[in-house]
Amino acid sequence: MTALRVVQGVLATCATAVFLLMVAVAGGWVSLSPPAALSLVPYGFAVLGLVLLVASSVMARRRLEEFRSARLTSGGSVGAGLQGAMFGLDFGLMRDIVVDRRAIARGHVRPARGRWSGVWALVLRDAQRLARFPQPLLGVAAAALTPYACEAVGLGMLTPWLAAVALMLALVPTLGALRVLSRTKGLARTLPFTTGAIRSALFVIPGVLAFVWALIVAPAFAGVVGGVGRGVAQASMAAVACGAAGLLGAVRWQTAKPVDFGVPMMATAAGALPPTLVLNLVRGFDVATLIVAPVLLNVDPIWSLALAVVVALFLRSGLNTDELTEQAKEQREQLEAERAKRGN
């Protein structure tokens, strides 16, 4: 596994370098004039890839009997879980299964003592978790390259939406605690904080990452690599709006409720399906699209920031129909108890 991770890191580094070179060439910063002999390189890579494919197949066949039955069994259970999550179009659950598998493979980690008090203890835990598993930072760094690449290749009109979606996907791994506390209501009730306070604390670390991302990508919206040129103020607000869209889209992804298969089904060509099943395909993307819509329509980005504030207040509250029903039921029971006391 260590050798595999090293190879993956080297390939990721090479891919990032090639990506940066592509952006530099498209932006006119670097001019490349490869020699004629370099035209044979693709054929050489094709032959090398074919040789590696054959060699890997032979090595895999020879080592096939060395797989332990326990590993095959666990892999089969993961496949079954992913199949069930895919049936419900629950991509968040699919990611949870993969993360759980990765945690089992890791085994254990050195525990870290918590500090501070109040909701700041939750913020510290998020920071400790990010320091222990810094892989999400690589995703945020890769998402910062998206607007530069889009502006350089001529996709300036779609840059805000593509940048927000890229940041959303990069910030999803940083909101694991928010997903746990949103899906596990009993655990959230054990904390002496309101739902809004808990969610506000869990927004801090991803919010800081989104703000840093906005600072990095602001020159891209200003037109340093070409594309749609904006003023400094407009580019800054557009970058902040895209950062907010990516953050709130990730929050929407993590806090969305699972599909309820107990509701009346809808007849389709694929069989009976819950009416809200198809919404799982667009959750997170809907919030990101809503917030960046004014920027896409070439309207003042201040409207995107206003939409972001409204969406943030809605997502922070964490209210849903189930909680409202439970609160109404508790209030009715308290009212009936008071009436019974007065009647006696």
Image (tube, rainbow, N blue to C red):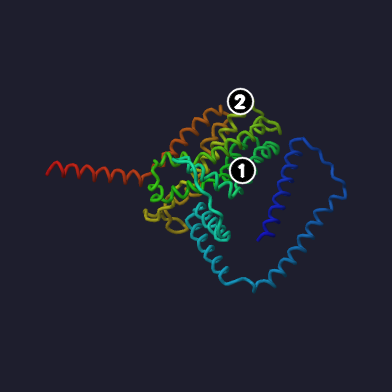
| Residue 274 image point, x, y percent | 42, 53
* In the image, residue 291 above or below residue 323: above
Q: In terms of depth relative to the viewer, which is nearer, 235 or 130? A: 130
Cβ atoms at labels 1 and 2 below 8 Å apart: no
Instruction: Describe the element under mark 1 as helix, strand or loop.
Output: helix
Q: In which quarter of the image is residue 323?
A: top left
Q: Total number of numbered labels?
A: 2
What amino acid type is highlighted by mark number 2? Ala
| Circle 1 residue | 140
The nearer-to-camera label among 1 and 2 is: 1
Instruction: Describe the element under mark 2 as helix, strand or loop.
Output: helix
| Residue 26 image point, x, y percent | 74, 38
What amino acid type is highlighted by mark number 1? Val
Q: Which residue is drawn at 56% across and 60% down?
A: 107
Q: In terms of depth relative to the viewer, which is nearer, 134 or 42? A: 134
Q: In which quarter of the image is residue 67?
A: bottom right
| Residue 165 image point, x, y percent | 58, 42
Number of the label disc, if any, that sits on residue 297: none
Q: In this view, does 257 lie to the left or right of 233?
A: left
| Residue 343 image point, x, y percent | 12, 43
**Viewport quadrant of the C terminus:** top left
Q: In which quarter of the image is residue 109?
A: bottom right
For the residue carrying disc 2, how many other residues have a C-alpha within 10 Å: few (<14), some (14-19), or many (20+)? few
Q: Residue at x 76, y 62 (%)?
A: 50
Q: Is residue 235 left or right of residue 36?
A: left
Q: Residue at x 51, y 51 (%)?
A: 92
Q: Distance between the residues labelled 1 and 2?
A: 23 Å
**Viewport quadrant of the N terminus:** bottom right
| Circle 2 residue | 233
Q: In terms of depth relative to the viewer, which is nearer, 322 or 293? A: 322
The first of marks 1 and 2 along the sequence is 1
For the residue carrying disc 1, how many other residues have a C-alpha within 10 Å: few (<14), some (14-19), or many (20+)? many
